[in-house]
Amino acid sequence: MGEYVEEALRSILTSSDDQRIEVIVIDDGSTDKTPQVVRQFTDDHKDAYDPRVYYHRHENKGKSRTVNRGFRLAQGKYVTIVDADDHLTARGMSSRLEVATSEAEDPDLIIGRCQVFGEEGILDLWELPSQRDSEALRKQFLYGVNQPFHLNASMWSAELLDRVGGFNASNPRCHDIDFAARLLQRAEDIRFLDSTVYRYRKYRSSLRDRLRVRIVTLIDRARVVRQNLNGAEQLAAILTGMATDLAKLLFELCVGAYPLRGHDK
């Protein structure tokens, strides 16, 4: 992610001037120029230096263990994730912090909107979910028909993180679905922010790569469902998820990549 991480870091640092923010960069054994790029922000002799950035590196462990290390290191009252190839909007951090501090009681979970972009520009906008009940949102994640929000467009309290625990390292994929479902299960106070806070990068992958992702997702989604649901609900969610993933798989085979949808918001 060496070609993207600088843009990601700059988007975080410019989205709020709050000096209490800490940006924890966990390098999962990268073999490109990532260390040199990040050191521009951690070396106080460099023009891009910002004392809010902390860099940690380890041998490749996979996303779940890498994110969990960041969770353990985090000292803040609230936590969120930014993937190295994505970035925040101009007020992607400050707008969420305003919600977190504007009420007498601190919310457990804050959910904003997500913009999808690619080489062609803005592709789509992930609107706020119409359903606001936490259990209904949890079921949407687990049934797999329509993911109600992007995990990285949310922000959760350190107290909620302590109750939930981190990513489940036994899940090669769909760890975000499992984590979001557990957040929603334990969150008591959820706030919705009518603002786009996160920008998610969409790639035009080869057909072979897309099919591989569909197959792995189908298997891993079923694993996550078994971890979170029981009885008839578990069976219904597995069957629904399988039908959805198979439909997407057939679409990829017969039609190709999903058509890109322009968006003017």
Image (cartoon, rainbow, N blue to C red):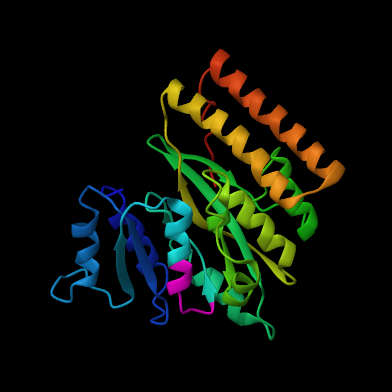
Q: Which residues are magenta?
A: 70-77
Q: Residue furthest right?
A: 232
- Magenta region includes residue 76: yes
Whole-percent x, y for residue 69 in the image: 43, 65
Choose top left, top right, bottom left or bottom right for residue 243. Answer: top right
Residue plotted at (17% across, 76% down): 44
Total numbered labels placed on residues in the image:
0
Left or right of 21 in this view: 51 = left
Whole-percent x, y for residue 146 in the image: 69, 41
Residue 130 visible somewhere in the drawing = no
Q: Residue furthest front?
A: 170
Left or right of 189 in this view: 65 = left
Q: Residue furthest top?
A: 254
From the viewer's perspective, is residue 202 above or below residue 19? above
Residue plotted at (20% across, 65% down): 40
- Magenta region includes residue 120: no
Choose top left, top right, bottom left or bottom right for residue 49. Answer: bottom left
Residue plotted at (23% across, 48% down): 31
Residue 158 visible somewhere in the drawing = yes
Left or right of 155 in this view: 106 = right
Q: Residue furthest left?
A: 45
Whole-percent x, y for residue 135 in the image: 79, 57
From the viewer's perspective, is residue 118 above or below residue 52? above
